Amino acid sequence: MDRIPVLQMGKFLLVTIQVDLYDRLALNLESDLVQMVSKTGARGVLIDISALSIVDSFMGRIIGNIGNMSKIMDAETVVVGMQPAVAITLVELGLELKGVSTALNVVKGMELLHKKIGSFEDTIEEEEHDDSSTD
Amino acid sequence: MKIDISKVFLKKKKQVLEQWMKNQLADESLREDLMSNEELRAQSEELLEALVRSLNDNNLEDAQSADFENVVEILSGISISRARQGFSPRETGAYIFSLKEALLQTIQEELKSDPAQLLSVMFKLNKLIDSFSITTFETFIKGREEVILRQTDEITEISTPVIRLWDGILALPIIGTLDSARTQVVMESLLQEIVVTGSSIAILDISGVPAVDSLVAQHLLKTISATRLMGAECIISGIRPEIAQTVVHLGIDLSSIITKATLASALRYAFAVLQLEVRKSSVKEKNSL
């Protein structure tokens, strides 16, 4: 069965949706992602939907759900690269994805994640950097 | 003795044209400012030529006949171009009716000796030209409608420019009433521009919107939500006191949206978000430029 890969990048998980989502795939993604968050202890999830050109209310809800689920598992979710048509559709459907942060592209999404988590973990990160430099 | 009408006109084409031109030139409403006499003559000649060629005894009564396709086509072309040039309906009508007059005058001379046939031919001819007149009006109005439609499109296009204020800051001054169709255009062009420029802040300036009702507010909120979904921030600026009053009276909740009084303060806010700073350059720096 098709699955959408969830990549781990340091403290973050990266999901790029390159195919059009169908219901089963979206549900799998939802459970996979939550599993991965718990397994890796990721602090942030970045979902790139720039290749997604069609959404329906179900997809919209799944995206919103993923955001909210990750949030209560203490991982920030950022959805990046939404197409204008997709944004208009979601708004017309009344799905405003209130719980999810958004960014224009992956670079800005990463910046946003760093900013959101960074302020909290700055000190720890610096220590880690020190360790690695002495190695 | 029965006379073939089509032959008569074919023979007397020149005379009819002269008569027609005379009628047209005599008319007070002749618009020499819109069309020169030579042009008018060429146009009339083309139409008359087509009419005389396709006219025969059988189709004299039937304006819908396929024989007249060419005539109707030329007629439509003329009336549409007249509509675009700004001729009034009366002037366009007078054009085709003066042709009728010329035709009838000619036929009258020809059939002086036979009043019975004259009457029947005149009757048929009247009907035919009247039917052409109706076609003329139809196409004239269609031409006008096309003009109006094009202007509507142009207005929607013109009135929703997305301006790049700064790197990463877009502004969209909205002028005129917002309705569903217009909001759609505004939303689409704004979102498209956000993607193209990679801007993270969009300023919607509504100082040109005459009134805000619940519908307009809903449209605005939709635009803002869509912008947020794209990953950009949306600021509303230019809320006039009257608009603030109506919005609050209508019970519309704009508290979740960043609102600024003027475009300038919205820009200032945008600079702050992007961690940019505007300051006066010192005299020294200015000289070095």
Image (spheres, coloured by chain):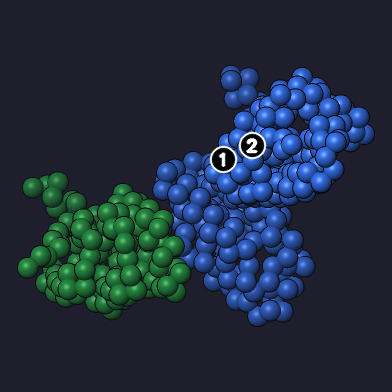
Question: What subunit carries mark 2?
Answer: B
Where in the figure is residue A101, as x and y percent of width and height? Answer: 37, 65
Q: Is residue B262 above or below residue B258?
A: above
Quarter that holds the C terminus of chain B: top right
Q: Describe residue A68's horizontal placement relative to residue B88 as left or right.
A: left
Q: Residues within 10 Å of mark 2 (few under 14, many from 20)?
A: some
Task: Tell me the tag on residue A33.
Answer: none
Where in the figure is residue B86, as x and y percent of width and height? Answer: 77, 38
- Which residue is rendered at x = 15% and y = 63% of the image? A4
According to the picture, the residue beneath numbered tag 2 turns out to be B55
Chain coloured green: A
Disc 1 secondary structure class: helix
Residue type pointed to by label 1: Asp
Where in the figure is residue B237, as x and y percent of width and height? Answer: 64, 58
The tint chain B carries is blue
Marks 2 and 1, how far apart in space? 8 Å
Look at the image and tell me whether residue A6 can be seen: yes
- Whether tag 2 and tag 1 are in contact, CB under 8 A, the answer is yes
Disc 2 secondary structure class: loop
The residue closer to the viewer here, A44 or A90, is: A90
Q: Is residue A51 above or below residue A38?
A: above
Q: Describe residue B68's horizontal placement relative to residue B116 as left or right.
A: left
Q: Residues within 10 Å of mark 1 (few under 14, many from 20)?
A: some
Task: Tell me the tag on residue B67.
Answer: 1
